[in-house]
Amino acid sequence: MDWLIGILSAVIAAVVSIVVAMISFLANRNELKSEREKFEREMQREMTNRLYEKRLEVYHEAILITNGLRRTYMTEHRDVLTEEYFNTILAKLDEWHGSKAFLLLSKQAANTLYALRRVLREKPVDEKYSFDQVDRINKAKTAFRIALRSDIQLLYKEELDHYRDE
């Protein structure tokens, strides 16, 4: 009978040890998962901050390039609105996009850039750009600038959403 009590004690001790080990395993696994998720959020936030800083550096140049496409400028300087004038702006935008902004633009900003490039490639009617063409160029420029601004303000939106969730 003593040997039965010894075996029973050993089995109980083994079961308790296994239960404690399983609880410990699950607790450690959950803690590691939580730490990994926290690390990933911090890395995502860091990458977002870096993207935001790069966009601030690079988007400023796009605003300067498109400055000559403002409605007031084009209205006051109708005589300089030649195909060469718009091709110069287009070349600067292409260089900007190819060298600095390619990886920074959101999908929306890239699409508005492509639309702006499309209207800038349009040929003038009778060597003069019509009011309709100038209006399309201005609208495409405005949409592009709004998309750039939206890319920069995205960080603020993410922060607001984060604070609402907490």
Image (cartoon, helix red, strand yellow):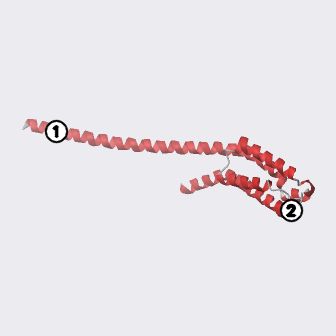
Q: In this rendering, would 13 be left or right of 75?
A: left
Q: Residue furthest front?
A: 126
- Foreground residue among 139 and 20: 139
Residue 128 horizontal/vertical position (percent): 89, 58
In the image, which disc is placed on residue 9?
Answer: 1
- Where on the picture, by quarter, is residue 55? top right
Q: How many numbered badges does the structure rendering display?
A: 2
Instruction: Name which residue lies at 54% across and 45% down.
Output: 41
Residue drawn at 14 percent across, 40 percent down: 8
Q: Which residue is nearer to you in this view: 94 or 7?
A: 94
For image coordinates 83% across by 64% down, the residue present is 132
Which residue sits at x=21%, y=38%? 13
From the top left corner, tell me how far across and down residue 165 is, in percent.
Answer: 54, 56
What label sits on residue 143 in the rendered view?
none
Q: Which residue is mark 2?
A: 130
SS for callout 2: loop
Count residues near mark 1 (Cα–Cα under 10 Å), then give few for <14, some for 14-19, many for 20+.
few
